[in-house]
C-alpha cells in the first residue's frame, strides 16, 4: 500500500462565493483525491475523513464503528484538550450503541410509520395553509424563514410532543436559541438548560394527565421521566431545525433554478422526486462522527481502534461515482438512495414525517404564490456558517405580485 493518502488538516468553514448549495471546495477536492482522507483533528489527533458515498454508507451500517458520546473525544473544529466527554444522558439514543439504542428507539418506531405520517397529512396541510394565509394577509415582502419555514415544523413538533398552545412561543424561542448556530456559548447553555427544564415539567404533566400525543403515549412504557426528557430532546433536535432549514434552503435552491421550479409547477406529481432530490442536493445535516471500536480495513486503509472518523454526508450525496452530474439539481432524477437521513440503525426515525412536511409545504407555497421570488439579491440571503450543525438559511426576504394576495 505505497499509494499516498490525501490529507485534510482543517475542516472548511466557508462555501464558495456564489455557490451556497455546494459543499465547501476543500471537501469536494478531498473527494476528487479518493473516498477517504487522513484528517488531523484540532490538538493534533490523527483520524479520518470519509467523503465517498459507498464508504460512508458502509460505516453507517458497521457495528464496529461507534456512536457513543463518551468515545467522541475529538471534534472536527474544537480542541477538547484532556476533557473527558461524559456518556449521553438517558434517552438521547442518537449517541448510543446497541442494546441501549434500541431500548429507546423501539417504543418510538410505531409512532412514525409511513401510514401514520400520511394520516397526519391533513393536519399538516391545515397548518401550512394557515401560514400561507398569514403571509397573504401581511403581504410582500416577508422573511420566508420566520413566516413559513420555521413555524410549520415547530407547530407540528409541538403538537407531537403535546406542548400546550400557550407555551409554544417561548418554547420555540428557547429551542431556536440553542439550535441556530449563532448564539453565544453563554446564551446557548442558558437556552439549553431552560429547554431541558421545560421538557422535564412537560413529561411530569403528561404522566399525571396524558393527552393525545407521542410523549403521553410513551408514559405507558417502562421509561423513566429522565429518559422521556432525553427522548423529547432528540425528537426536537431531529424534527425541527433540520426540516425548517430544508424548507428555507430548498425554496432558495428552487428560486435559483427557475427551470426546475417551472417543471415542478407544471407537474405537481414531481413533488415526491423533488423532495428526494432536494434532500440529496442540499444535505443540511452535513457531517456525523463515528469512532472505530477495533482495527477496521476500509477503502484499502486500516482504521485503527479508537480512531475518530468524520462522515461527510454532503460530499457522499454529491459523489460522481453514485450520482450522475451530482452538482446539478435535477428534480426528475431517477437515482435514489441518498444519505440525507443517514443509514443503518441510526437512520432518521422521523424521515417520513419530514417528507410529508416538505411535500405539502413546497407544493402549497409555489401554488399559492406563482410569482414568488427573492426580494434581495441572492448574495444577500443570510446563510448559516458551516460551523453550525445544520446548514441552512438565517433569513430570506421574498416577494410576489400583489394581485396574488
Image: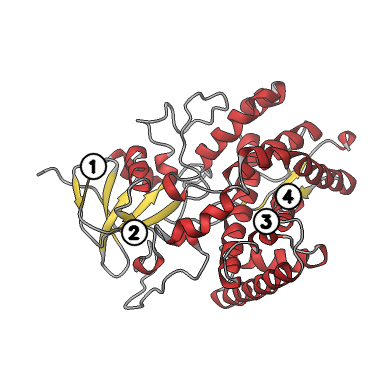
**Gap in angstroms between the C-alphas marked 4 and 2:** 36 Å
Left or right for 254, reference 17: right
Tag nearer the camera, 1 or 3: 3
Query: Residue tagged by mark 2?
Result: 10
Q: Residues within 10 Å of mark 1 (few under 14, many from 20)?
A: some
**Gap in angstroms between the C-alphas marked 1 and 3:** 42 Å
Seen in the picture, residue 171 relative to 253 is either above or below; the reply is below
Left or right for 111, reference 337: right
Query: Residue tagged by mark 3?
Result: 214
Query: Residue tagged by mark 1?
Result: 299
Q: Earlier in the sequence, mark 1 or mark 2?
A: 2
Q: Position of residue 83 (x, y in %)?
A: 36, 78
Q: Earlier in the sequence, mark 2 or mark 3?
A: 2
Tag nearer the camera, 2 or 3: 3
Query: Residue tagged by mark 4?
Result: 152
Q: Position of residue 387 (x, y in %)?
A: 48, 60
Amino acid at each position: 500500500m505505497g499509494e499516498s493518502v490525501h490529507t485534510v488538516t482543517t475542516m472548511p468553514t466557508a462555501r464558495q462565493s456564489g455557490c451556497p448549495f455546494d459543499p465547501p471546495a476543500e471537501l469536494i477536492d478531498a473527494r476528487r483525491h479518493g473516498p477517504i482522507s487522513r484528517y488531523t483533528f484540532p490538538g493534533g489527533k490523527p483520524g479520518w475523513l470519509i467523503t465517498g458515498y459507498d464508504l460512508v454508507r458502509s460505516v453507517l451500517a458497521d457495528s464496529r464503528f461507534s456512536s457513543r458520546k463518551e468515545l467522541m473525544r475529538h471534534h472536527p473544529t474544537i480542541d477538547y484538550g484532556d476533557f473527558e466527554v461524559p456518556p449521553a444522558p438517558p434517552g438521547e439514543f442518537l449517541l448510543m450503541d446497541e442494546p441501549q439504542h434500541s431500548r429507546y428507539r423501539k417504543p418510538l418506531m410505531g409512532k412514525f410509520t409511513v401510514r401514520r405520517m400520511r394520516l397526519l397529512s391533513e393536519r399538516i396541510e391545515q397548518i401550512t395553509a394557515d401560514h400561507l394565509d398569514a403571509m397573504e394577509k401581511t403581504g410582500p415582502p416577508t422573511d420566508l424563514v420566520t413566516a413559513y419555514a420555521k413555524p410549520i415544523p415547530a407547530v407540528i413538533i409541538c403538537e407531537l410532543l403535546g406542548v400546550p398552545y400557550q407555551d409554544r412561543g417561548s418554547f420555540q424561542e428557547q429551542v431556536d436559541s440553542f439550535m441556530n448556530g449563532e448564539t453565544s456559548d453563554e446564551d446557548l447553555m442558558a437556552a439549553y438548560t431552560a429547554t431541558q427544564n421545560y421538557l422535564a415539567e412537560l413529561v411530569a404533566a403528561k404522566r399525571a394527565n396524558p393527552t393525545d400525543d407521542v410523549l403521553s403515549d410513551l408514559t405507558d412504557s417502562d421509561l423513566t421521566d429522565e429518559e422521556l426528557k432525553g427522548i423529547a430532546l432528540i425528537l426536537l433536535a431531529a424534527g425541527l431545525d433540520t426540516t425548517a432549514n430544508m424548507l428555507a434552503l430548498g425554496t432558495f435552491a428552487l428560486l435559483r433554478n427557475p427551470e426546475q421550479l417551472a417543471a415542478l409547477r407544471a407537474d405537481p406529481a414531481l413533488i415526491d422526486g423533488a423532495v428526494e432530490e432536494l434532500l440529496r442536493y442540499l444535505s443540511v445535516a452535513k457531517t456525523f462522527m463515528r469512532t472505530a471500536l477495533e482495527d477496521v480495513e476500509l477503502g484499502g486503509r486500516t482504521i485503527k481502534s479508537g480512531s475518530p472518523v468524520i462522515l461527510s454526508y454532503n460530499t457522499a450525496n454529491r459523489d460522481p461515482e453514485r450520482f450522475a452530474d451530482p452538482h446539478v439539481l435535477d428534480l426528475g432524477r431517477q437515482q435514489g438512495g441518498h444519505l440525507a437521513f443517514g443509514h443503518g440503525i441510526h437512520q432518521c426515525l422521523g424521515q417520513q414525517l419530514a417528507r410529508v412536511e416538505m411535500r405539502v409545504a413546497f407544493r402549497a407555497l409555489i401554488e399559492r404564490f406563482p410569482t414568488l421570488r427573492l426580494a434581495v439579491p441572492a448574495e444577500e440571503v443570510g446563510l448559516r456558517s458551516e460551523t453550525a450543525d445544520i446548514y441552512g438559511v438565517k433569513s430570506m426576504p421574498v416577494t410576489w405580485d400583489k394581485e396574488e394576495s
